[in-house]
Image: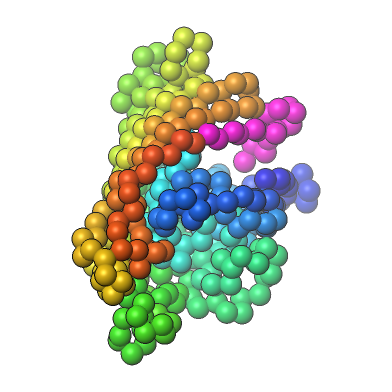
Amino acid sequence: MMGLDLDTDRLVGLKGGTIRFYVTNRHGQNLANTAIGNNTSVQEIWGTQNTHLAEFTWNQKLFNNRLELVAGRMSGNAGAFFSSSIYCNFQSNSACGNPTMIFKDSNFTYWPASAWGGYFKAWITPKIYFEGGAFEVNPYRKRANDDGFTFSIKHATGAMAPFELAYTTNFSNDKLPRTYRIGGWYDGGDYTDPVLDANRKYAVMTGDPYATLNGRGGIFFRFDQMIWRPNMNSERGLTVFGVAMKNVAGRVAEDHFLEIGFVQTGTFKGRDKDVLGFMINDQRMSKWTIDNILVARTSAGGSRHVPRDEIMMELTYGAQISRAFRVSPNLQYIINPDQIAEPFRTKNIKNTFIVGLKFTLDVLSHFNIARNPN
């Protein structure tokens, strides 16, 4: 990824403004497609497989930074919605960069698939904020040949609107920093029924397209809480985190998502920046998703036992080799991999063990390039 932040105060004298322009280049294969068969990637960096405009936005802070406005070309998760700095210590896409259910049950766009959008964040107190936004729903923005540089809203079908209320602290105002968030989303764009065609028959059997529906939504609660900090002069410590998400409207792929985990920052003597983490989550498939698989499987002579819960877990260690370079080996395990992508399989996909390795190079730190303070 390459990009730049332009300070509008220095450019034109407009204080509090930043223009952001980021481009990514991703290539490779998705292990979930080539080896596992499930519908959730175990590689968080996989996606788009081309050079792609990830963000081109104007960010404006007002009223002594108590109000932030952002608009332009971005992915839905470019802001703080459904994200946390903790999540991408892990490589599994079930956790990084957002709880995966939001992508299964809405048209929320993922980095770097950019579309038109905007959001605001209003600080009610120094520790409490409310934010909301709206993002274009356009199926063409997720196509393999889309590069993000097509700015037309042709083919858009609606908007996705997330919102949240949060209480958050940091090391400057809390001995044990924490964040608690409640919120939800409404997706006013088109989506496909998980099981039926337009004639109310099983699409997987008729071969007709799945019916087009519109309107779905959900609610969530998320938190991260440092619970142990041995030295108040250091940021070393143990943080626990969790997620609960629930569908409340629409015929969707997943009923709910639950996650719990921990991250230990500072592991051994002299390893203050190293991170040890573990997470486990449960994706509960909806009754419609299970019906779709059952109809296909039984028609092929397969078993009627289809697990509803896909459980994914990861143990990771992030070793900070230098100020700019981090190596993160990890072990992942999937219980009951879903077969949404392969409904005609006659048997369940076996539990899967994955060995992963992630490298991260911070170019700005490596070359001592100053960061935008905003």
Question: Looking at the image, which residue is at 66% across and 63% down?
Answer: 148
Question: Looking at the image, which residue is at 32% across and 21% down?
Answer: 228
Q: In the rendered view of the protein, which quadrant contains the C terminus? A: top right
**Colour scheme in use:** rainbow
Rendered location of residue 94, percent (x, y)? 41, 48
Question: Looking at the image, which residue is at 67% across and 38% down?
Answer: 372
Residue 143 visible to an observer of this rendering = yes
Residue 256 visible to an observer of this rendering = no
> Considering depth in this image, is 197 or 37 the residue closer to the camera?
37
299 with respect to 85 (left or right): left
Farthest-out residue, top? 269
Residue stretch rendered in magenta on the structure? 357-374
> Considering depth in this image, is 34 or 187 the residue closer to the camera?
34
Farthest-out residue, front? 301
Rendered location of residue 230, percent (x, y)? 36, 14
Question: Looking at the image, which residue is at 36% across and 77% down?
Answer: 204
150 with respect to 240 (left or right): right
